Amino acid sequence: MKVIEIEGARQLSGAIRISGAKNATVALIPAAILTDEEATICNVPEITDTDALCDILKQLSVNVNRSTESLVINPQNMKNVEIKEEYSKKLRASYYFMGALLGKFKKVVMHFPGGCSIGARPIDLHLKGFEALGAKVTNEKNKYTVEAKELRGANIYLDIASVGATINIMLAAVKAKGTTIIDNAAKEPEIVNVATFLNLMGAKITGAGTSTIKIEGVDRLGKCFHEVIPDRIEAGTYIIIGALCGHNLKIDNVIPEHIDSLLSKLEELGLHLEIGADYVIVLDSPKELKPTNIKTAVYPGFATDLQQPFTVLLTRANGKSKVEETIWENRFMHVPYLNKLGANITVKNQTAIVQGPTELKGCEVVATDLRAGAAMVAAGLLAEGKTTITNAEHILRGYEQIVEKLKSVGAKIVIKEI
Ligand code: UD1
């Protein structure tokens, strides 16, 4: 098991550069197999989710050439074999191989994907979308077989604007016969990044980033070179850390409009920020912060993935703040550990009430999932004394070189294997 130890309450200054977006990368890697030639992806984050997807590519006999932050993926000799559970369970995004393999071979056999335990996480909308395109879905225990004689464009309305279902349907529809329209599509920047990638290969997708996406099927996809967008959740996490204990902390390589909802909330709390074209500087962290309320929502609303780190910041606000989680039903697993550190938070149904300000004192806590782990790092940096975070491998799934990045701005943090 990996353990992160932090000696907290130190001021952080300097610059942190944001890596490529995890949630774009985990879709781009499976999407790359749709090319009939070769795809190069750069600005790929060195996180364990990237490793897990490359392992699946290798299992499918796809040629992968990986160097620092870039991947050259050549699927010309690939074999459409069953994706084993030991691979798919490592991350939820392995489900993008469903859409990609179905789109390319008209058949896919894989096990239900794994991922963070933050809610029920069904994939019914993905499967309904595949069925609308003409596929037949069968499942035995955890194993899904999705196959079609022919994939035909269709009009698909998503009951929920799901990121995963939107991308997965796009992947399956890109080579289908005719036109597919996805209505009530999710609008996250990662979806736009994936659509751009497919279009660079020769796909015909319009409307990505709006709630109606149109995909005209094409017969073949060619060679392309593509760049992953900066990770808005990683950026948001470090900006929150800056708000907790930063002084002139610059977060570089950011697209500020991707985190508008966070930046407005930070200003509401009373933080002083400088927002540039591709950076945000947390100028200082005032002693007294005002309380505020947040409600997570689909993009461009307040990102659920930033809810957990943001809750740490609310422990510093003077008064009562409310955090409403509307996307995942089990996303308050960080709260008992924040309370163990000294916070005063109560949870009822999908709402947490944070009574601040409270002083946090280091102790042993658990990273129960990826973003809860990020919240523990943020809390450990704020707390007096030593915080030990167990199960830290969750954090490495989504944050490239988190220990090195934080050390470089003055944090006292180490990672150990025990
Ligand atoms: C993606 C992100 C994740 C983020 C989430 C919401 C990736 C790899 N992960 O997850 O970090 O927290 O978006 O912004 O990009 N739902 C169904 N049926 C389905 C699909 C989803 O009911 O078939 C529900 C889910 O249970 C959830 C909601 O829809 O309540 C949103 O899920 P979705 O947008 O699909 O999240 P993911 O794509 O899994």
Image (cartoon, rainbow, N blue to C red):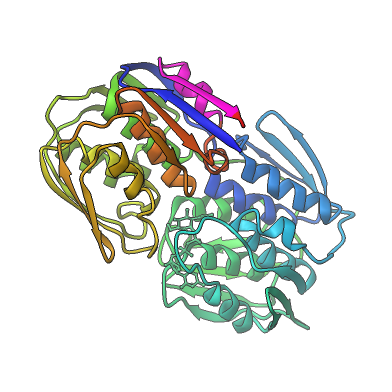
Percent x, y for residue 19?
53, 33
The reply to whether the magenta stretch includes residue 404 is: yes
* On screen, residue 119 above or below 228: below
Count of marks, rendered view = 0
In this orientation, which residue lies closer to the viewer: 370 or 131? Answer: 370
| Res 130 quadrant in image | bottom right
Percent x, y for residue 294?
22, 52
The residue lying at 48 percent from left, 49 percent from top is 369
Percent x, y for residue 111?
70, 68
Q: Is residue 239 visible?
A: no
Q: Which residues are magenta?
A: 401-416
* On screen, residue 77 above or below 179: above
The residue lying at 86 percent from left, 57 percent from top is 78
In this orientation, which residue lies closer to the viewer: 247 or 35? Answer: 247
| Res 108 quadrant in image | bottom right
* On screen, residue 149 above or below 329: below
Percent x, y for residue 161?
42, 68
The reply to whether the magenta stretch includes residue 146 is: no
Q: Quadrant of the C terminus?
A: top right
Q: Is residue 233 visible?
A: yes
Position of residue 121 in the picture relative to residue 133 (left or right): left
* On screen, residue 202 above or below 144: above
Position of residue 287 in the picture relative to residue 397 (left or right): left
Q: Quadrant of the N terminus?
A: top right
The residue lying at 32 percent from left, 64 percent from top is 326
In this orientation, which residue lies closer to the viewer: 8 or 279? Answer: 8
